[in-house]
Image (tube, helix red, strand yellow):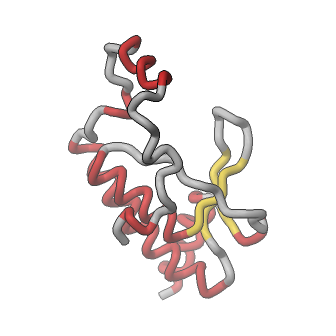
Amino acid sequence: MPYEALPPDPFAGDPSSDPSRMLDALHDVTAPEDLPLDEEEREEVVADLGDLAVFQALLAPRGIRGVVVDCDDCEEQHFHDWDLLRASLQQLLEEGHMRPHEPPFDPDPAAYVTWEYCRGFADATLAEQ
């Protein structure tokens, strides 16, 4: 799924005269998240995209809408629908970073599981076959 499927960038169209743009001049060091992915990181993202397809195929029919992630920065849970997560990973693969996105509105926590749960469910399901 192309990243155009993501909601529009909330910062697109900022006027070039925006004074906050001058703050960029204060930072001459490239942030780690702005660096391109190395080969190992690319392989990990490709593997995650493959895993995500399997997880969605197995769990979406059971009513699971996506993945929940515990954020260390804000100490809150972030809910990612399957399509949004796929688009974000694809963008990471193509551009080396993910742009901001809007979280789902009022998500039902029972409809999201952790990545580890997805992996365990997939391993158990595929082992039965």
Question: Which image quadrant for residue 108?
Answer: bottom right
For this rendering, which residue is in front, 79 or 30?
30
> For the image shown, how many numbered marks are present on the structure?
0
Q: Is residue 97 left or right of residue 127?
A: left
Residue visible at 40% across and 11% down in the picture: 26
- Image quadrant assignment for residue 48: bottom left
Quadrant placement of the N terminus: bottom left
User: Residue, x 53% and y 49% (percent of image)?
Assistant: 10
Picture coordinates of residue 72, whole percent (x, y): 65, 35
The residue sitting at the left extreme is 39
Residue nearest the viewer, comparing 129 with 110: 110
46 or 23: nearer the eye?
23
Q: Is residue 69 left or right of residue 89?
A: right
- Rendered location of residue 57, percent (x, y): 50, 82
Q: Is residue 115 above or below residue 128?
A: above
Q: Quadrant of residue 120?
A: bottom right
- Residue at left 40%, top 57%? 89
Q: Position of residue 84 (x, y in %)?
A: 51, 64
Q: Position of residue 18 (x, y in %)?
A: 47, 28
In the depicted structure, whether residue 86 falls above or below residue 103:
below
Residue at image location 47% in from the left, 63% down from the top: 6
In front here: 3 or 129? 3
